[in-house]
Amino acid sequence: KIESSAPAGTILKGINFLKNGNDPVAKLEEEYPHWLWELLDEEKQKTQSQDPNSRTYHRKERKEMIKNNNFDRSRKK
């Protein structure tokens, strides 16, 4: 299991992006949603991007198709 690098109660300086907001404070690991830790799991992300039923797979395919089309158009000029 992946663990947080900041202990609960730590002030996370520099993460606040609101003009009048405060820096957030780290929570206990149990307070964060389970999918957050899955984002850090490289193996799971890799298998998900290869699953034809996932949104990530289709976005990657579409991006590659657009790149190829743009390259073909640039060569025709």
Image (tube, rainbow, N blue to C red):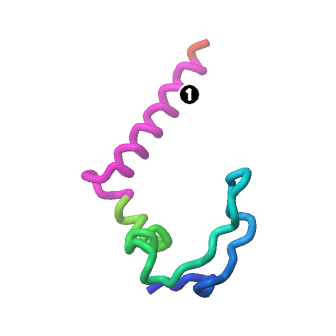
At 47% from the left and 31% from the top, the residue drawn is 66
Q: Is residue 17 left or right of residue 46?
A: right
> Which image quadrant for residue 25?
bottom right
Check disc 1 and give the amino acid type.
Answer: Phe
> Which image quadrant for residue 6?
bottom right
Q: Identify the image quadrant of the C terminus.
A: top right
Task: Work out whether residue 66 or residue 19 is closer to the camera in this orientation and state it.
Answer: 19
Magenta span: chief secondary structure: helix
Q: Position of residue 48 (x, y in %)?
A: 35, 61
Q: Position of residue 36 (x, y in %)?
A: 45, 69
Q: Identify the image quadrant of the N terminus.
A: bottom left
Q: Is residue 60 left or right of residue 76?
A: left
Q: Is residue 48 left or right of residue 5?
A: left
Can you name the residue that lies furthest to the left here? 53
> Which image quadrant for residue 50?
bottom left
User: For the residue labelled by badge 1, is the local secondary structure a helix, a strand or a loop?
Assistant: helix
Q: Position of residue 17 (x, y in %)?
A: 69, 54
For the image shown, how many numbered marks are present on the structure? Answer: 1
Can you name the residue that lies furthest to the front here? 20
The correct choice, above or below, for 5 with respect to 72 in the image is below
At 69% from the left and 67% from the top, the residue drawn is 23
Looking at the rendering, the stretch of residues picked out in magenta corresponds to: 49-75
At 35% from the left and 44% from the top, the residue drawn is 58
At 54% from the left and 79% from the top, the residue drawn is 27
Task: Work out whether residue 40 or residue 74 is closer to the camera in this orientation and state it.
Answer: 40
**Residue on which disc 1 sits:** 71
Q: Is residue 16 magenta?
A: no
